[in-house]
């Protein structure tokens, strides 16, 4: 595995697998030993750490504890799922494939369903894929964490999408095997086996599925998984749940969780498409080879560490001086920009203006279920024209602009955009994908390159073109680059403590529990005391009323939607014993949480 020799030995790489490493936490919530000092790292080291973390996705299985991406069982299950998809493609009137998830898992459901439908159209087949995202289409572009807790909402949306269908392959995506929204849908599928075949995609072993009671439900995520395991024996349900190792920023499943979701589902769907178009069987080797092409994508992408570092530094500098980062993209790569930008608010407590994405063609290109969402407010303006009208006039050289495109996009158009931006700021960069030996494109590219401060040129071997996987590879590569840019920039801004996102929003049960755990870890105070401090920070009071302490978590998380800096504030209260007002004022003076905490701890 390329890059693994970078300061880490195998034992550090696999340390998280040891039974006594953070034993009470599922893999998806553990902190990654590789990144425990990411908050003090340089941009270059951050990128290297992300590279090594990403490479953990493809580590080989060792022992019986964890299935991995390339494990035999995972490949076999993908083959079975691909066969079901093949059957559905042959009967598009009566059947469909539905993918569903919350947050990034739902956004990836959208990305994969649009890409896979396009692939079917190119094969002259009818579209069969659809997506559901908790909170509806607005969640594609903004953070909507509360619906994640609502299993009924999950079922309602599933019924709506599947109306009139006789056969449905339902793919529930929950990286942490935890979202009640998805658990509700899987439970519904299990109750209606005559129509629905449930598939679960996630990145914890089954026994680590969340076992917390769900309001007004008789099931937990864990009990649903157990029922699915039973049915999996007769292939009436499927579990695809390899471990990919803890996230670089603890719990940030948008990163490896999102990448692995994309890999697994695209591999299964591509195998089904190939089988449909060539009438050849789906093979173990075919699936395995495709997975390994994704592994090479990591190597191709991270061979550009210096270029990625430049982007991280530029974006970090912009955020540090309270300016902005803009992704201007073309085609599906722009969608990855929109997705990455939308994740910064829930992940880092960022403002929606801090990192924003724009797509050529706006909602026409997005082609989402509900059509244009511009009426919902300024953050839903996503077309390049919106950027030109709303952002360009106020752009300064402290803002970072990233052009994201490929050699197949209209170079004249990219050039025009580059010139417009360049008139306002030299801080313009490009992420450009080209195919090996594409000299015609290189000539036009030269003009654009001259306008940019840096160009990250990713060159794909002809082999990717031939195998038809190029688009998937470019997308994953762009995802890795943008995840590195937004994560790295927020780390440099001081939003991370060790490798925890401390300024997380506490807007659903999972995040509430994560926040309490984090406070326990960082303050060494007992759980009860941490929860009390958390509630004080949520309700902004020094004395909690009986009404507050007796309310359920849903009430707390609803209230927390309008509170900022909840966890940092609670931590300062715990560490110093100060009143809320005192803690708030000190945090204002020292907003970099790492520094603030260090100040009080030592
Ligand atoms: O609750 C918010 C969140 O953590 C998002 O950041 C994430 O994308 C989403 O939940 C989905 O989580 P999971 O895939 O584990 O259900």
Image (cartoon, helix red, strand yellow):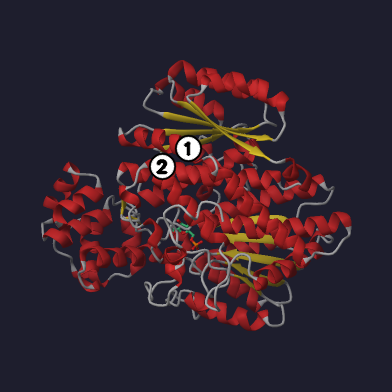
Label 1 or label 2, whichever comes before in sequence order: 2
Would you identify the image quadrant in which residue 558 lies? bottom left
Is 526 located above or below residue 323 in the figure?
below
C-alpha distance separating marks 1 and 2: 7 Å
Is 369 on the left or on the right of 348, as rendered?
A: right
Check contact, mark 1 vs mark 2: CB within 8 A: yes
Is 120 on the left or on the right of 475, as rendered?
A: right
Would you identify the image quadrant in which residue 371 lies? top right
The CB of the residue at mark 1 lies under 8 Å from ligand 1 = no
Is 279 on the left or on the right of 488, as rendered?
A: right
Label 2 neighbour load within 10 Å: few <14, some 14-19, many 20+: some
Q: Which residue is mark 1?
A: 306
Would you identify the image quadrant in which residue 513 lies? bottom left
Looking at the rendering, in which quadrant would you find the N terminus?
bottom right
Q: Residue at x 38, y 72 (%)?
A: 21
Label 1 neighbour load within 10 Å: few <14, some 14-19, many 20+: some
Q: Classify mark 2: helix, strand or loop.
A: helix
* Horizontal and vertical percent position of residue 199: 64, 69
Q: Residue at x 31, y 67 (%)?
A: 517
Q: Which mark is residue 44?
A: 2
* Horizontal and vertical percent position of residue 581: 13, 51
- Hey, which residue is sitting farthest top in the picture? 423
- Hey, which residue is sitting farthest right in the picture? 279
């Amino acid at each position: 595995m390329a890059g693994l020799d970078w300061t880490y030995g195998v034992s550090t790489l696999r340390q998280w697998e040891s039974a006594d490493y953070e034993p009470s936490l599922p893999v998806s919530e553990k902190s990654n030993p590789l990144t425990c000092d990411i908050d003090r790292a340089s941009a270059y080291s951050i990128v290297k750490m992300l590279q090594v973390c990403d490479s953990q996705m493809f580590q080989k299985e060792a022992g019986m504890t964890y299935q991995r991406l390339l494990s035999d069982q995972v490949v076999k299950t993908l083959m079975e799922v691909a066969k079901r998809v093949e059957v559905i493609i042959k009967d598009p009137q009566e059947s469909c494939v539905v993918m569903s998830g919350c947050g990034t898992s739902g956004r990836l459901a959208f990305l994969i369903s649009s890409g896979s439908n396009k692939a079917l159209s190119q094969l002259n087949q009818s579209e069969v894929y659809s997506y559901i995202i908790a909170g509806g289409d607005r969640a594609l572009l903004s953070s909507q964490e509360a619906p994640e807790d609502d299993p009924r909402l999950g079922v309602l949306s599933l019924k709506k999408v599947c109306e009139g269908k006789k056969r449905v392959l339902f793919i529930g995506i929950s990286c942490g095997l935890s979202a009640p929204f998805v658990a509700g849908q899987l439970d519904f599928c299990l109750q209606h086996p005559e129509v629905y075949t449930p598939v679960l995609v996630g990145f914890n072993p089954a026994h680590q599925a969340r076992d917390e009671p769900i309001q007004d439900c008789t099931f937990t995520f864990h009990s649903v998984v157990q029922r699915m395991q039973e049915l999996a024996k007769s292939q009436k349900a499927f579990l695809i749940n390899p471990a990919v190792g803890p996230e670089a920023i603890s719990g940030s499943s948008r990163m490896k969780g999102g990448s692995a979701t994309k890999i697994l589902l695209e591999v299964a769907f591509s195998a089904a498409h190939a089988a449909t178009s060539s009438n050849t069987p789906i093979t173990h080797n075919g699936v395995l080879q495709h997975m390994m092409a994704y592994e090479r994508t990591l190597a191709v992408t991270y061979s550009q560490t210096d270029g990625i570092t430049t982007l991280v530094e530029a974006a970090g500098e912009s955020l540090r001086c309270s300016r902005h980062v803009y992704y201007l993209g073309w085609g599906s790569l722009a969608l990855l920009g929109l997705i990455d930008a939308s994740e910064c608010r829930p992940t880092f407590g960022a403002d929606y203006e801090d990192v924003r994405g724009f797509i050529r063609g706006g909602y026409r290109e997005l082609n989402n279920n509900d059509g244009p969402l511009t009426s919902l407010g300024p953050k839903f303006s996503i077309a390049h024209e919106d950027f030109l009208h709303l952002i360009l006039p106020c752009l300064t050289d402290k803002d970072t602009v990233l052009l994201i495109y490929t050699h197949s996009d209209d170079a004249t158009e990219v050039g025009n955009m580059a010139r417009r931006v360049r008139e306002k700021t030299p801080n313009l960069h490009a992420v450009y994908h080209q195919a090996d030996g594409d000299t015609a494109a290189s000539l036009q590219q030269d003009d654009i390159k001259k306008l940019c401060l840096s160009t990250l040129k990713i060159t794909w071997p002809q082999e990717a073109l031939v195998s038809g996987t190029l688009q998937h590879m470019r997308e994953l590569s762009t995802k890795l680059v943008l995840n590195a840019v937004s994560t790295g920039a927020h780390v440099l801004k001081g939003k991370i403590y060790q490798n925890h996102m401390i300024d997380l929003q506490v807007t659903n049960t999972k995040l509430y529990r994560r926040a309490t755990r984090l406070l326990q870890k960082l303050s060494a105070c007992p759980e009860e005391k941490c929860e009390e401090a958390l509630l004080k920070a949520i309700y902004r009071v020094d004395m909690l009323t009986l009404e507050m302490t007796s309310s359920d978590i849903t009430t707390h998380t609803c209230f927390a939607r309008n509170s900022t800096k909840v966890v940092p504030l609670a931590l300062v209260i715990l560490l110093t014993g100060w009143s809320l007002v005192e803690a708030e004022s000190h945090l204002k003076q020292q907003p970099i949480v790492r520094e603030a905490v260090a100040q009080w701890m030592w």
